Structures are given as structure tokens and as C-alpha cells.
Image (cartoon, helix red, strand yellow):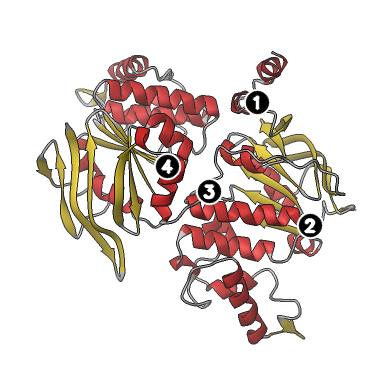
Amino acid sequence: MTYLRMEGISKRYADVTANDHVDFAVERGEIHALVGENGAGKSTLMKILYGMETPDEGQVFLQDRAVSITNPQAAIRLGIGMVHQHFQLVPSLTVAENVALGYEPHNGLFVDRKRMIERVRDLSERFGLSVDPLARVADLSVGIQQRIEILKLLYRDAQLLILDEPSAVLTPQEVDDLFDVLRRLVAEGRTAIFITHKMREIMDICQRVTVLRRGKIVGTTRVVDTNPADIAQMMVGRDVDTLQGTRRSPVTATGETRLIVRDLNADDDRGLPALRGISFSVHSGEIVGLAGVEGNGQRELLEVLVGLLQPTQGDIVLNGQSITHLRSRQRRERGLAVIPEDRQHEGLSQPLSILENLMSTRYYAPPLSRLGFLLPRPMQQLAAQLMQQYDIRASSIALRVGALSGGNAQKVVVARELSDNPAILIGSQPTRGLDVAAARFVHDQLLRLRDAGAGILMISADLDELLTISDRLLVIFGGRIVGELNSAATTREQIGLLMAGRTETAVQEVQN
């Protein structure tokens, strides 16, 4: 039975058509994948369904009844709920308080806390979510926090769940738990729309998949009748090697040691210990992956390495020289480059042009300037060359970066950081939020840089990415390196156990 139909949905922003007469249907009791390149129109379509945007044309039907969804409250009343990629929780409140926020049961003028807690506990037990209603959200892992987001929807009796990149910050075991919950929900008749870039997840959990390309529906197919390569081809309009699931043969590092980190300690912005005795090295011609659930020290490690955060103890050696107390620009001049996690706010200046962003780390040096004066022509020539070399698709180097798609914006960052042929590149979540083609492009550039002799430290929450592109794997938990693994000889399960801090269990799995 068709539960949801979206017919003829169109949405335009100025001269950009985000959705072009989209027809999209979801059956009751299925998990339906919605995929497409960045800018294909997925988010716009789901924002319309959840009442965050109003379509210019088209109609939404629930159970064959035309409905008007003018805001998220209207969507919730119709039984539609959404789990956003970035959780919408209040850390200082308890689980029960977050779940019931805005919908608390009352006893006269007062909130009936006992009834609220009991209902949250009942829902948690009924759907196998295993959440303590009295726990404070700030004290819980991201996996538990995601369960709370799902509980919020169940508390509001959502029948249609929209999940936007739900596994982005989860360990493999937490992903498996999430999938078990989703299967239980659909077994009870609920329905889910699953937005993801990960082919493994589409094949594992979804029954059907719909592909959007440039605002239009390319096709809908049953998952059992397709494969990752075919889905990727539908997404981008050409054959694409998705890379996911195919492990390369890792290189054995024989080159010189590019980066040495010794006994590094640092505090976070609250003054609490974030890094505890971190030590590792990266050699020329290898990619070292750093796996871990977000919030275990990855951000602080990146900030210490690039000079944004001073360590309380330890040493950083680049090409045989200590850079521990050097400023960020000095570290760059000695061969350090970085692809930051947040390209929008940390990697790029949105109001500035492509040219200005590409030149932002080198404008002060010849041949781009002389005697303190900028030289426009060399900058324009270099920017045009980098646009072509790194396939940055834009009408002009003068185009504002904020107008680019996510994939093209990331290419600007990659072009700027890789074009100086750094000795060490630190890439944090380099393909997060990118579609298959854009992610493959970034991977190819990283492999090219590695083969040219650079050392690369890649921080990622995507295990498929780490397993397919890394030569060695480090696992971080609680600010410590808890494991070093050969990426070709390890398993997702073993890495997941280390990511969860279960080092003894992980070791036992290897021994068995």
C-alpha cells in the first residue's frame, strides 16, 4: 500500500531549480533510500515533506489524502518526523525531558513527570532502544543520543520517519543497533525514508531506492534488483568506481619519517584533558587513517597539529624539525597542509571568490606578490590552472564560493592544500557529505599525493573510507591511541570495538 505520494513537486530558488516536477512514492512498512549527488535536490524534497519549505508546484498525499504541510508542527500532527544529521537535543536536560519537550503531559498546571518518564521508558523498552529516561544527555554517547532522536519521533507517534545520514557519527556496532531498531519499527507498520551516500547501507537496510539527479527523478528500483555500481551510475550519469567495499593493497612504508608526534597532551576549550599521551608517526608515501567516534580528541589533535591549540605536553616533529611552538603559517611553510572538517566555516570564506580562497594561503609570497603588492595576473593564471586541474565546475574564478555545491567547494579546499605538494597533509572528514563522484575524486587526489611521496594523516568517521584508502589504521578513544592496525588484515568489528573503548575484547577477537 502506498503511504506517501509526492506528485509534481517543484521548487526554485532564483534561477536555480532544486526540484523539477518530482514524483516520489513510498510504500507503508518499507525503508526507502533516497540518494543523489550533492545539489541533486534530496534535502529540498525532504524539507518540503517536513514543512520546512513550501513547494512552488505539486501536491503531497498521505494514504491517498491530499495534505498541506506548512511547517514542521503540521508535519508532526500528520505523523511525519525527521531525525536531522545534527541532533536537536538540549545537553543539560534528561532523556525524558528532551523526548517530551514541547509535548509534556500535565496534571493540572504542572508537568506530570512520572507519567512522562514512564512513557519514555515504555517506548524505549518496546522498541529495544535501551535508554535511561533519567540520564542527562550531555553524559551520553552519540549512539545513545541518536536513539533519543528516534524516541522523540515515537513519542509523537510518527508513522513516517525521515533519517538524514543517520550513521555519520556511529561505530559499526551502533550502526547495527540502529538497523535493528529500524527493522523493528517497520515490522510494526512504520515507514522510513533513508538518506545516505553509503552504498553498503542501502544494500543492507533498504528495500527500494530512488535516485535524484539535477532535481529530477532518474528512477526507482528494488534493492535486490540492483548493485552499488548501477546506483552510482544512476546518480552521476556515468560509470563510477565507488571505491567502497574494495580494499586496496596497502603499501609498506619504507620512506623517511615525515611526522612524529610524541607524548602529546592537550586540554579542550573547557580546560579538560582532551589528548592523553598521543604518540604516532607518519612516513613518506603512506596514508595513516585515524578512526574514532567523534568527540574523542580528533578535533583537538588536528588543532594542535596545525597550531591552533597549544599542547600542555609533548612534541611535534615535521621533517626532522620540531614545530611544536611555531605559528600556523610557519608550519605551512615547512610543508604542512590541512583539509579541515568543516569546509564551510573553517576551510573556506563563503563571501569570497574562488580565486581569493585558492590564494588565501600563498598570496603574500612570490610569484603572487612583490614588495608587499599583490600581482593580479599571476594569481588569476594560477587560479584558472587549479580550477581546470582539480575539475572545479564554475563559470568563473570570480564566482563566490558560497554559490558552489558541496563537492565543488571541497575541490577548492583540496586544490589549495594539495597544489603546494606538502610533505604532510592532514585531512579531517575529507569526503563527509560528498556524493559518490566527488568522494572518489578526493580519494584519487589523496592517492596521487601519497604516491608522490607525501605522508597523509586522514581522520574519518567513515570506516569504509578508512579501510579502502588507508595503509595503516590508528584508533582513538578518550584522547588516547588504543590500537594500531594493518588496514588489510583487520575487520570492521574489531575497529568498532576499539572505537567503543573495548580494547580487551578487540584483542581477544584477533587472538581467536
**Left or right of 336 on screen, residue 468:** left
Judged from the image, the secondary structure of the residue bearing numbered disc 2 is loop
Q: Label 1 is placed on what type of residue?
A: Leu
Q: Mark 2 points at which residue?
A: 423
Q: Label 2 is placed on what type of residue?
A: Ala
User: Which is more toward the observer, 73 or 506?
Assistant: 506
The answer, for residue 90, to whether it is visible in the render is no
Q: Name the residue under label 1.
A: 498
Where 137 falls versus 209 (above or below)? above
Please tell me in which quadrant of the rendered image residue 1 appears. top left
Q: Residue at x 85, y 45 (%)?
A: 254
The Cα–Cα distance between marks 4 and 3, rounded to whole angstroms, is: 17 Å
Mark 3 vs mark 2, foreground winner is 3
Sort mark 3 into few (<14), some (14-19) or many (20+) by Cα contacts within 10 Å.
some
Q: Name the residue under label 3.
A: 241
Q: Name the residue under label 4.
A: 196
Q: Which residue lies furthest to the right in this view?
A: 320
Q: Residue at x 74, y 81 (%)?
A: 367
Query: Decide: marks 3, 2 in contact (CB < 8 A)?
Result: no
The Cα–Cα distance between marks 3 and 2, rounded to whole angstroms, is: 28 Å
Q: Which mark is residue 454?
A: none
Q: Sequence-wise, which precedes: disc 1 or disc 2? A: 2
Q: Sequence-wise, which precedes: disc 3 or disc 1? A: 3
Sort mark 1 into few (<14), some (14-19) or many (20+) by Cα contacts within 10 Å.
many
